[in-house]
Image (spheres, rainbow, N blue to C red):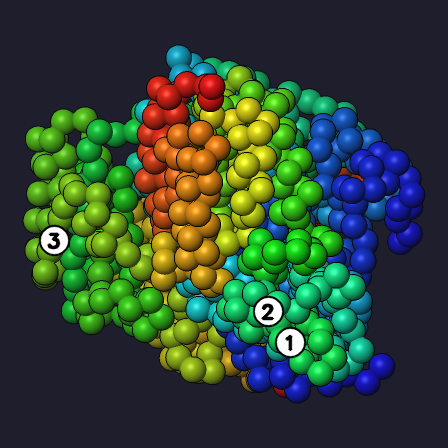
Amino acid sequence: MKVDLDKLTKIVGPENIISDVADLYIYGTDASVHESLASAVIAPKTIEQIQAIVRYANAELIPIIARGAGSGMSGQAVPIDGGIILDLKAMNRILEIRPADMLCRVESGVVDDDLNRALQPYGLFYPPAPASSRVATIGGEIANNASGIRSVKYGATRDSVLGMKVVLANGDLVTLGSNTRVEASGYQLDRLMVGSEGTLGIIVEATMLLRPIPKLRCLGRVSFNKLHEAGETITEIISSGRQPSMIELMDNIAITAVNTTLDMGLPDVEAIIMFEADGEVKEAVDYEIEQMKKICEKHNGFDIQASYDAKTRTKLFAGRKKLFAALSRYKEGLACTSLADDMAVPYSKMANLAEKIHEIADRNNVVMTAYGHCGSGCMHTKILMDPTKKKSWEDAKHAVAEVYDYVRSVGGTTSAEHGIGLSKAPSWKKEKNDSIEMVKAIKKALDPNNILNPHKVQDAPNDWVTATKLRYTAR
Amino acid sequence: MVTNFARLKKWENELDICIRCGYCYENCHLVKLSGWESNSPRGKLSLLYGMLSGSVKPSKYITEKLYECFYCKNCSKNCSAKVSVTDIFSDARADLAEMGFSGEGVTAEVDKDFCSTCGICVSVCKAEAIKIDREKKEIILDKIKCQGCGSCISACPSGIIKQKHGYDITSDELSAKIKNIVKDDKKKVVVFCCNWQLHPGLRLSQLAVSVKNGLPYGIIINVCAGRLCPEQILEAFDHGAWGVMIASCPFEECEHDGNYKAKARVHMMKQLLQQLSINPKRLTIDYFSSTEGAKFKKAADSFSDEIMALGAMK
């Protein structure tokens, strides 16, 4: 495949295109285990430039991969067939904040935390809050359907998208969705784009639903000596009709990692849960917290603390936001790989899943942790292993397969919030076995030349280990 | 090409430890300014990994990237995996130099023809990158050690130390920005800000004009308070600014001791302003940690209010 750099340079200007092999290497990686060299990297500044680039790529059958912060963990933005990377971080303007309509309009490269800082003076916030919100772009979050700590109450990105502008594979610009909270019949094309991982169109602008910042937030933390009891507590909090604004689980491996790396001083127990309630009326928030405390105690939770004070809340929550990286320091010689990194199961299976993860890890000679936004049914893990040994990768492959086999067997899903990309595609394809042809038909209709992030999700290779070169080198 | 990464090799496991989350973008001036991931700490670490694994060949281009770093160490200090990012860069620079790849990046350069070898630059360089060769009577600047902080540039009495490339912080670029803020944007207060505070002006995203609030001050990111020259402060007043604020990092947090230098400079400048019949209150310095964005905004707002009350200079 030959990319005509002169032609692309004429479209975007020389300052917005790079093609040194060093740049192509960097843009061929993300936070996943995959790497694959891109052919050119372009940072467009306007929608018109994107349309022109896509028209060129479509005519020349060159893959085109939209990229936000490159913080995806499943290889969503890794150019498996090479091609043009569209770095959308330069499309970073917050175009409108409309408090009366409870919405904002942003370009796709706007960073989540930046948006929330801009919204704060209006008393509003954009709720999905993934752990990567400090760098993750709104476009990337939409393409991934990101969610986070507050999704248990406010939903995932999909629940906050009202509409968007999308450049299609033929270069046409379409406006999807509306500026209203509800939109009834007709295909919900904006929602189809959410979670499509850049395979159906390039999201260039988004209209997002905002929520009022609650006046009160109360955060609690509770310790457990048995992981299973922590899991059962989460199940009961949700099934009893409580309305937490956050429920986070950390197992002993996660606790050890943040204590070792960041000196957080978390209790040395088998699991902790952090739970939060928010609202306008103190009595109502108190009631929710008290009810959750009672459920914790019923399942042998102890050392329960709760506070409205912002500093104390930060202290209680310390470690969770920085956990992903801290896991890399869990034990000398082990690195934290984004494998089997996320999944969701029905609430009643939460406790079993947490235990199953540890059981599978032991059986396969790797270390795995159980943590995550369990309030929304989402569980994360990572595989901690010596990435320099070939045997580790074989063990990891077995462990990944076993985890997802279990998840599917209990009616769970492979992709809770971290996307599918390459590393989760094998399990996802099995999970969606009877609808995969429908998915492929939609892809074919919208991208007949298969230029938009090809060979991902439904079209990804069946073996993630050989799908691309791995970013770790066995030595 | 024969490669020899003797120093870099010892960081091999550390490069595995970096999970490439990319959270370091938030703290890197170069990423915010250029937008390219190849200027980010994560991107550079990936490149080093690529060179070690044989995926990428050493090149002048890669070397130059490594010299484009101000060593503020915001990335290392905020890395949850505790990766010693800039130490790795330094070792890679040294290895590449031995392979014949030299870089310039944001490092300083001395015009030896006009240097009196007074040695002031030696004393202000915390990185110990500058030495005097007494026999040859010349300044020796070690590019590998130079951290591009600019302290020597602002301290040189002859004004003959420069940075060719500066990501908006060479003397010429700073001058242009000062003029732009005061003359074009009609701001009454200029705030020079190091790379340590997470202020709106330091973010990755931009507010559209329609949602921007009418702040009376304009922010210039000068990366380190220590690089600020007295003439740049005077330049702001000369263009018509009513006040100048220097936002530095707290005393124990600066990698270059730029805050101590800036404090002394402000003290001296206040006396000079007095002699020029300019109210010294029109110049201030304050110190903010990387998590004190709110404190910074409050201080900048408060200083602007005081300056607006003082009004224009007579």
Q: Is residue A393 left or right of residue A39?
A: left
**Left or right: where does residue A100 sit relative to residue A462?**
left
Amino acid type, label 3: Gln
Q: Residues within 10 Å of mark 1 (few under 14, many from 20)?
A: some
Q: Which mark is residue B119?
A: 2
Which residue sits at x=26%, y=39%? A245
Counting the numbered discs, the total is 3
Q: For the residue labelled by badge 2, is the local secondary structure a helix, a strand or a loop?
A: loop
- Quadrant for the N terminus of chain B, please: bottom right
What amino acid type is highlighted by mark number 2? Gly
Instruction: Compare residues B98 and A279 and report the one nearer the observer.
Output: B98
Q: Which residue is mark 3?
A: A305
Q: Please state the horizontal and vertical placement of residue A158, each as a whole percent of the image.
A: 47, 34
Question: At 33% across and 34% down in the image, what residue appears?
Answer: B298
Residue B98, quarter of picture: bottom right
In x, y percent, where is residue B70? 58, 59
What distance separates the C-alpha of mark 1 from that of mark 3?
A: 60 Å
Chain bearing tag 2 is: B
- Numbered badge on residue B132: 1
Side of A166 relative to A72 (left or right): right
Amino acid under label 1? Ile
